[in-house]
Structure formats: C-alpha cells, structure tokens
Amino acid sequence: MKAIYLTLFIILFAACTEKADNNVAYKLAESNSTKKIGISDETNIYSNDIHYYKEPSGVEYLSIGNSNANNIAFYRLDSCKLSHIIRIKRDGKYPINIGSHGVINLDDIFITTMNPYVYRINRNGDVIKNYNLMSYCTENRLCSNTNCLSLVYNPLVIINGKIYCPQDIPPTRWNNSPNGANFEFDESPLSLTLDTATGVFAALPLGFPELFDKNDGHYYHNEGYSRIYDGKQFVFSFCALSGIYVTQDFKQFASYPATSKLIGEIANKGFNSSVDIQQGQEDFLTKAEYGNILYDQYREVYYRFCYAKSKKKVDVQYYFETALSREDFSIQIINKDFQVVGETMFKAGKYAPKIFFVNDEGLWLSENNYERIGVDMSDSLMVFRCLKLDYAK
C-alpha cells in the first residue's frame, strides 16, 4: 500500500513540476563576456551571410561570406583571429559569384549564387560538384533561387544526404492576372530537396500559410521567413505572422500563438505598381516585423527576434548596415512546447541584432551597430557580447 501511495506521489509531483516549469518566466541578461575579432581587409562586417560552425573536435568558427571579394573568411572563436580564407574559383571557364554559403565541414562548403546553380566547393575553393536548379523547372513546375543567408536566417540543413532548399513564392505570381495574384499560398512549395548523390531536385508538398490578401491589388508584401531545423522538426518564423509554424514532414504545419509584446500583430500591406523603388526600400528597412528564429540546443529553447517600426528616416545607401542593425527590438524566449516564456526588450543603438551565433555559453549578439562606427567602434573589429538565459524576477 505504501508503494502505491509513493508511486502516486511521484506522479503528482512530476506533473506539478512540469506545470511549474511551463510557467517559469525567463529573460536574456547581458554578461561581461565579449569576443573581439580582428577583421581582414577582405571581410565585410556587415555581410548578410555570417554563420557559426563547430568542428567535431570542438573548435568553433565564424564563417563570413564576402560577395565583393568573392570569398569566405573563417575566424576561430577561441583565438578571435583569422584562420583561413577560401577564394572561390571558376567552374571551368565560368565565374562563380557567391550569394550565400553553408558549411558541411571545413573541406565541403555549399554555395548558392544569383544564377540557377548551386555548388559544393572544397577548402581550396575548387568546385566539387554543381547542381542546376533549372533541371527542376518546367512550364508547369517553377522554382526560385535558393539561399542560406543569415540576414533572414535560413541556415544550411542537410539530412541523410538531402539539402533542404528554401523557396519563395513563384516569381511569376502576377503573370496574366489583372485582378489578383496568379498563385495559391498552399500550393507554393516552401522547400525543395536536393539529393546530393543524384543531383535531383524535388518539391516538398507543404506550402505557405496565408501571408496577405493576394487579391488586394498591391505588390511587394512582406513574404520573408526564417526557418531552422532543431534536430527533429523544422520551425518557421514568418516576417508578417505572429505565430510559430512547425513541421516534421513538410506535409502539414502545427501553429502556435507567439504574439510579441513589442510589435503585436502585423498588417501586411503592400504597394501599388507605381511605388518608387527607394520608398519601397525605406519601408522594408523600417517596418515592424517578426524576424529570425534560432535554436539553443544547450538550453532547449528557441529565440525569436522581433523588430519595432523604426522612428527615424533611413539612408538606403547603407541598406545592409541599417537592415542588420535595426532600431528597438526584442527577443522572445520560446520553450520546447512552443510557449512564449519570456521576452527581453532592447533599445536602439547598441546591437546589430541580425548578426549573432549561439554556443554552449549563450546567445552572442554583435555590438557593431553601424551608428557606433567612428564613435566607439571600428569596422575592422567585430565585437560580440554574450547574453545569458536567466529567470525573470
């Protein structure tokens, strides 16, 4: 009888503990830990293609794609010094202009470009293999270029030899459609897979959730999204939707409410066809949006960035500097059950919140906010500060 009571007590205690854990509030606290990385002349600290990579040996790197120099620079995070630079060579007689990259290992790098090809290169910059996205496209089967950028975070995901290639809504969406967009959200694939053994591309069945009223007669809505793989499932943060979207099989989504206290719900309004290009760029740089989602495997939480509407006029001459730095922002803390268990607010001017990485110490944010360059920072030094997950008081 005592054994039965003891068993019941353990079960009830575990249930109460689990319930209590779900009600715990968290915050991200600034620490005194920083990393200061001396940057080579060939490296752009405002690259939109910056990634963290950890070798099986435990050595950590920050890899930075530089489209102007057409190279990838690797910096060790233990010494905070340049390790090596991969200078991308030609594919036969054709140049390869890097768009983004993902590290499979230090001698096997995945490269996307502005043309329909994706490549694998080695540490010397030699082409191991190329893959032609146009081999997938036909009259009735279209695709967009793919990327693994960090600006809108879509890092390389490779599972069982298949690379998951993020897709946009088809670029032909407005063709021959005077009264509305010629596409369906749920029929526009979110991802292709690339079989690295055969070179075959295939579309996965899961399409986009509804991002806007496609018959409102407007163009240039916010269609961006960040997505990560946590080892079990793919997790999406759409720029104009407050919810988190999760899939394990790319056949259907589970969605979870995750409205930010900073920005609330987003009105995804586009422009008419006569919009000035500069005005459109300014709007994209200043509008409120839900941003990058990251997974912290060491603490089993997700971080999602939320960017407030900018209060001041921006100079589109510094497009990427502005896009990476933003103004006021917050970081939501989301637990493994996709419940928001905290949201930490940050004021404009200190961080560049779209430059980041996560390791066993915490979440590292860049302090290279472009407004600080020439004031208390240099563009030849990348500075990161570690934010620690802590209980909110």
Image: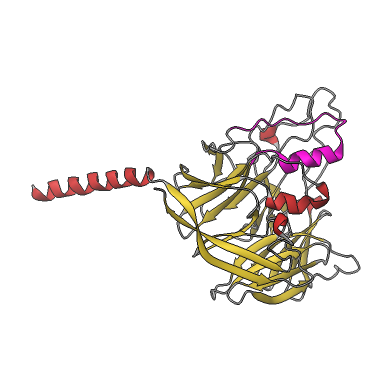
- Write down the region rendered in magenta: 265-289
- The answer to whether any part of residue 196 appears in the image is no
Is residue 118 placed above or below 91 in the rendered structure? Answer: above
Most extreme residue toward the top is 179
Q: Nearer the viewer, residue 261 or 268?
A: 261
Q: Residue at x 57, y 62 (%)?
A: 385
Task: Kindly indicate the quadrant of the structure image that contains residue 205.
Answer: top right
Query: Is residue 285 on the magenta stretch?
Result: yes
Q: Quadrant of residue 181?
A: top right
Q: Which residue is more in the foreground, 53 or 196?
A: 53
Q: Position of residue 1 (x, y in %)?
A: 8, 47
Residue furthest out toward the left: 1
70 to 345, vertically: above or below:
below
In the displayed structure, does residue 120 sit left or right of residue 328? Answer: right
Where is 382 relative to 4, above or below? Answer: below
Q: Nearer the viewer, residue 278 or 223?
A: 278
| Magenta region includes residue 194 | no
Residue 121 spot, x, y in % from top left: 75, 69
Numbered disc total: 0
Task: Specify how the rendered protein is coloured.
Answer: secondary structure
Q: Decide if residue 370 is in sight here.
A: yes
Q: Nearer the viewer, residue 302 or 10?
A: 302
| Location of residue 247 (image quadrant) | top right
Q: Position of residue 7 (x, y in %)?
A: 18, 49
Residue at position x 45%, y 57% in the image = 299
Q: Measuring from the top left, give residue 204's x and y in whole percent.
A: 65, 45
| Residue farthest right in this picture | 93
